[in-house]
Amino acid sequence: MESSERKSVCIIGGGIAGLASAVFLDAYGYKITLIERKPVLGGRTFSFKDKITGFEIDNGQHLLMGAYHETLRLLDMIGSRSQILIPAKNRVPLINQMGEMDYFHIPQLPQPFNVLIAFLRLNCFSWKDKLNLFKIKKALKNHNPQKFLKSTVKQWLILMDQSEDAIINFWTPLTLATLNESVDVASAHHLLTVLQKGLLGGAFDSQFLIPKKSLNALIGNPAQTYLEMRGHKIIKSTSALHLHVLDNIVRELECSNGEKIKTDYFVSALPPRGLLKIIPKGFVDSLTYFSGIKKLKFSPIISVNLWFDQNFIPELFVGASSTKTHWFFNKNRISDIQGPPYHYVGVLSAAYDLLETPGHVIKEMVLNDLYKLFPEGKKAKLLHSLVGKEREATICHSTETETYRPFQQSPFENFFVTGDWTQTYLPATIESAALSAKIACGHIVSSFS
Ligand SMILES: Cc1cc2nc3c(=O)[nH]c(=O)nc-3n(C[C@H](O)[C@H](O)[C@H](O)COP(=O)(O)OP(=O)(O)OC[C@H]3O[C@@H](n4cnc5c(N)ncnc54)[C@H](O)[C@@H]3O)c2cc1C
């Protein structure tokens, strides 16, 4: 396309959804201006330098799956797919209530044998639980999203005749890890989607993937280089303030640096509250598209970084059902870095009750959890620690949520809404953010052609 003919797009927000929108639209020849409030790109997937050690720390440990097709496509395009670790053994170590190690190990076999064997090998499943897996398989095959929308994961598991042991030792850590919510609150519909996409897709779809280096190295930095090399404009440390809308068309965006951006299309890649702030007040109250967004609720994640002089976690990562800390990640093993120091990250999902607890109290609690799971850790010296709270890590995947997630086409003709929280029928994850971008870009491209 000649540059004079190129249609222009302003993308508001530089998280995965914004970056994916920019990269996907670049492929169709659009001219992009991207506005990001923070000095770094990546949104909720970012890294920062720890002031004391100088180490680059992620805001939170992220796990991906082979089923993240749009995310992997994005990483391929920006050239950072090699930053992903594909563990040689596709297994999730889980320490049960009795302190015993169990493995959810998906062998390299064709579907559905790989998944079947993974479940049959689980020690925390009784024979009755294993026999009742056929009910789960049937439910997955006939998965109609509406059917289980209003059931919690717990209610659905009881319907599937899963025992209390299986719920506590397997389904609870899985639900917390994938939906950032407890089995009592999370919607069964979301867990079914995770199982369907992750376990019943292609063989690679069930593969766990872990970023090897920092999140900045995986997403923010390579995406910025990719876009700037193609001549697009990225304006960081600048907030979008107001959209001006006339005759159902967004005419311009006013920014905190005084700029007024006029483009053919506008894409919001903002979090829900951020979006509502830039929409003219009258529309938020009068259009159900926007007023529904107000009702979305959020779920937090707390990450506790710990550095020791000795290594005592033998796995890449491990889940636990008897402690308040749900997961521990071994960063040296993941990044292939020699210690000391040995860096572990404890993750507490849906940690609503700890949001107002001081960091030093949370650190002590997580240390106790770590020593309970790995008693030899008591011999190691704690060198440094850092507690991070992400209050709005994801939307809360409750039984109400789906009603309020908006589609990507907004009521304004040239304005599209992306983000992990928009309606993709996936849980709010990196993949949902990338997929929402693909859908929004599809609308733009088809409206132009
Ligand atoms: C601790 C933690 C752990 C997680 N673990 C996983 C995991 O293991 N696997 C997984 O798939 N997902 C995980 N997630 C979720 C994942 O990070 C998100 O789904 C994804 O990053 C959302 O991307 P997004 O682009 O939709 O939104 P965001 O990343 O929130 O992007 C929104 C952007 O808009 C910017 N912005 C806000 N207001 C303005 C304004 N007025 N003007 C300009 N810019 C603005 C923000 O600064 C931000 O950069 C985790 C999240 C957290 C916090």
Image (cartoon, rainbow, N blue to C red):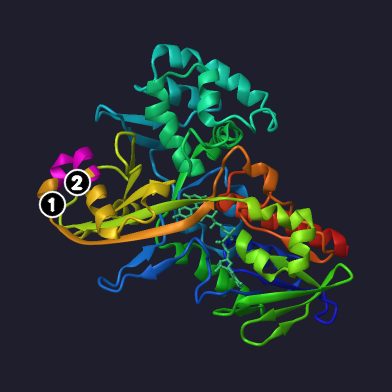
Is there CB contact under 8 Å for labels 1 and 2? yes
Task: Report the residue at 42% width, 48% height from top.
Answer: 352
Q: Residue furthest left?
A: 379
Amino acid tagged 1: Ala
Residue bearing the label numbered 2: 312
Residue 129, quarter of picture: top left
The segment highlighted magenta reads 369-377
Quadrant of the rendered image holding ligand 1 = bottom right
Per the image, is 423 magenta?
no
Our reading of the magenta stretch's main secondary structure is helix
Residue bearing the label numbered 1: 380
- What percent of the width, then of the height, locates residue 387? 32, 59
Label 2 residue SS: loop
Q: Relative to 175, does residue 60 appear above or below in the rendering? A: below
Asked if residue 59 shows in the view, the reply is: yes
- Going from N to C along the chain, the mark reached first, 1 or 2, is 2
Q: Relative to 1, does residue 421 appear above or below in the rendering? A: above
